[in-house]
Image: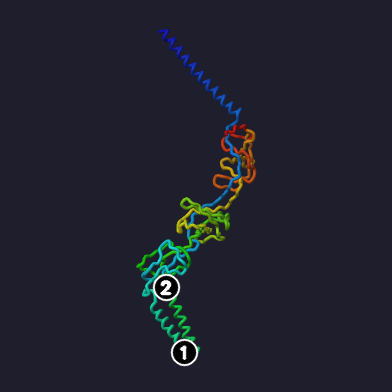
Amino acid sequence: MKKLMKEILLFGVIVSAFNISGCSDEKIESKSMEQLQTENGTPVEVEVVQPQHFEKSINFFGMLSGVKQSVNGAMIGGRVEKINVKVGDYVKKGDIIMEWPTDAPGGMFEQVKAAHEMSEKNFERMKKLLEAGETSQANFDGVKTQYEVNKRNFELQKQLHKLEAPFDGMITNIAVKAGDNVKAEAPVYTIAQLHKMRSKVWTNDKEISQIKKGMKVLTEFRGKSYKGRVIDVAITPDPAKQAFYVEVEIDNSKNQLITGITQDIIIVINETDNAIIVPRNLVKTDSGGNYVFVAVNNIAKKKYITNGVSSGLHYKVEEGLAIGDKLIVKGTAKLVDGSKINVIE
């Protein structure tokens, strides 16, 4: 029994010694790592400062329309007799888009036509009488004037029954079908010139002060980018919206943008080539101002910088950094000016 108790005590001593030895080794190992880091420097990653393209922009939402666009209504009420085009057709100015019957209740086609034909006959008759010396110039002039008035009325009446394209363009919408009864002035079709698109966006007083005519405009549609420019900037706010409008024009020479859709309209208010830019998270501040860390001969050096325009997650640096500087981009948390560093390639 005594022998068994001795063996148990001995085993306990050995285990305790082993544990103490293990703890001691861990402390030594931890201390060695700290010493190693102190000797070799804080590990960091750097990037060589290079000139970059810098853009600052403001985003808006705006609806696209053709550079020239017109919603056209029926000149008279009644039944639509014929539609000569379909959506997507390109038409010329003066082409007949839709037709109404000449007996439409909203028109006076037959009456005006009869008056025109009668005055035309009188005009031709009086013309012959004047040439034969059988009537006076005054009588002829009166008949001629009446003929010209009736002729003009007849031309206008024909236009009421045949709706013409006001300019060259593409038919983008047809709101009726042949046989439909429509009211006078009801919108029946839309025509647009789509080689360029326009959009009007609304801005606040802070934004409008940064936007100028001619600034670059960008938008994306179905994975493709389109460029344009600012063409008009309001100088007073709209009383109803309490906002300033900005009108933009976007190139659509391939007719891929669609009228009537709402797009993300990007206005570039600042653009610089060969700029020095740094991520916002690398810029620190103390009583001396804004600064970043750069690597110089395995030493972290504090460099004060002057920030210019900011855009998203970056600053454009106006002063303090130079092309070729080694900007420390990782491992800056514990750095101070003069810290020894170990640049990790």
The quadrant of the image that shows the N terminus is top left
Image-quadrant location for residue 115: bottom left
Position in image of residue 186 (x %, y %): 41, 67
The quadrant of the image that shows the C terminus is top right
The numbered dot on residue 129 is 1
Q: Nearer the viewer, residue 312 or 298?
A: 298
Secondary structure state at the residue bearing disc 1:
helix
Amino acid type of the residue tagged 1 in the rendering: Leu
Q: Nearer the viewer, residue 208 or 100?
A: 100
Image-quadrant location for residue 96: bottom left
- Can you say whether 108 is above or below 329 in the image? below
- Can you say whether 217 is above or below 27 in the image? below
Position in image of residue 102 (x %, y %): 38, 74
Residue at screen point 57% across, 45% down:
314
Position in image of residue 262 (x %, y %): 46, 55
Q: How are the colours assigned in the image? A: rainbow
Position in image of residue 284 (x %, y %): 59, 40
Q: Earlier in the sequence, mark 2 or mark 1?
A: 1
Question: Crowding near pointer 1: few (<14 within 10 Å), some, many (20+)?
Answer: some
- Can you say whether 39 is above or below 224 in the image? above
Left or right side of 336 for 260: left
Question: Crowding near pointer 2: few (<14 within 10 Å), some, many (20+)?
Answer: many
Q: Nearer the viewer, residue 221 or 2?
A: 221
Amino acid type of the residue tagged 2 in the rendering: Leu
Viewer-side label of 2, 1: 1
Residue at screen point 45% across, 85% down:
124
The numbered dot on residue 160 is 2
Tell me how far mark 2 sits from mark 1, CA to CA. 35 Å
